[in-house]
Amino acid sequence: MKKKLLGMRISPGLKKWMLKKSYFLKINTITIGSVVILILVGSIVRTLGAGMGCPDWPKCFGKYIPPTSPDQLPDNYLEIFRDQRIKKNGRLASIFANLGYEQFARKITNDPAILKEQAFSITKAWVEYINRLVGVLIGLFIFLNFFFSFAYWKDKRWIPIGAFLIFILTGFQGWVGSLVVSTNLLHGFITFHMLLALLILALLIWTYVKAKSIQRINNSTVFSISMLTMLLLLVQIILGTEVRAIIDNLIADGTPRIQWVSFLDVGLFYVHRSFSWLILIGAVSLFYFIRKTKQVQLKRCSLFVSGLVIVGMILGIGMTKFSFQEWMQPLHLIVATGLFGLLFYINLCFKFG
């Protein structure tokens, strides 16, 4: 590696520290776990209805540390932050209109739900604020992941390139998060926010596999089953975010939790529920065929996949039977996230043909 990297002069001591590949593998593993935790924290925030606990971004009620009492806010604070969001949404709508998405642009500017402000709640403000602090911490791990990836610059240049892309996507994810707040949790942005988090997770796993030099196995059958199961899971996650959007509306309307199931008696919910059986069939089939390859680690991963699918189904049934208990919803999402990560890892271990 040259003494200059990305235009910066690197001292010999710092360069030697950067070039230790073991450091990258450790921080990469920590970062993968931290991204999963951030997704869990985000789900908890949404479950508690604290997504708009701070009506602005990156500050919270115009402050770097959230207020502890409504007395610290002006009397017309609801109008102040609503007007700020209207201006920001207007600029955002112009971008979408210029891109040809005029209907979506009109929704951003005219939907009454987007303009609705949430009164100050110290609990919700601090829950959302902690979520943002966790996001900042994960951002630090992402930067360290990029920093130590240069240990592979000479022999595996795609690893630092991938780590740089992760770093850029994380910044973009932060901007999307600001749009989620600006549009009052518009579920289209929430879905995109979630899928972007899964993309970052997938890229982190990809750089891990590259760094570990895992030998890919030729088995078109296993690869096809694993890929199909993962794609079905992605569809399931998207359907789940749409079902969740219905629940968010019920929360906003003050509908009692015990009545939520009756409002979910729609085709979308039934499709989401039925999809889980297809994923279970895929997971069991994957374990059956991986067992024949005699790859012990992959066998354990595929067994864990089947177990997580069953746990996810039990949680899904439990939510409908027990009035969507708050602790079940984040667990349901984190199980899906873990499933995606494991299936993506298994896909990388096999190649078609």
Image (cartoon, rainbow, N blue to C red):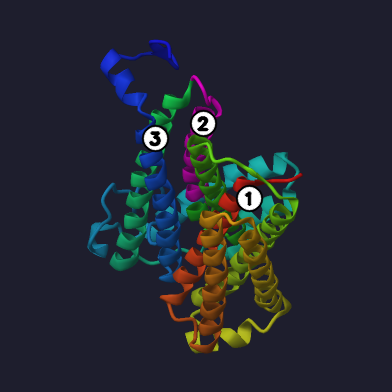
Q: Is residue 141 left or right of residue 258?
A: left
Relative image position of residue 216 (x, y in whole percent): 62, 42
Quarter of the image for residue 52 reads bottom left
Q: Nearer the viewer, mark 2 or mark 1?
A: 1
Q: Which residues are magenta?
A: 154-179
Q: Which mark is residue 24?
A: 3
Of 103 and 189, the residue lying toward us: 189
Q: Is residue 64 above or below residue 230?
A: above
Q: Is disc 3 placed on a helix, strand or loop?
A: helix
Question: Neighbour class for label 1 at 10 Å: few (<14), some, many (≥20)?
Answer: many
**Quadrant including the N terminus:** top left
Q: Earlier in the sequence, mark 3 or mark 2?
A: 3
User: How far apart, in angstroms, are the residues tagged by discs 2 and 1?
Assistant: 18 Å
Where does label 1 land, which residue? 347
Of 193 and 60, the residue lying toward us: 193
Q: Is residue 9 above or below residue 129?
A: above
Where does label 2 land, which residue? 159
Q: Are marks 3 and 2 in contact (CB under 8 Å)?
A: yes
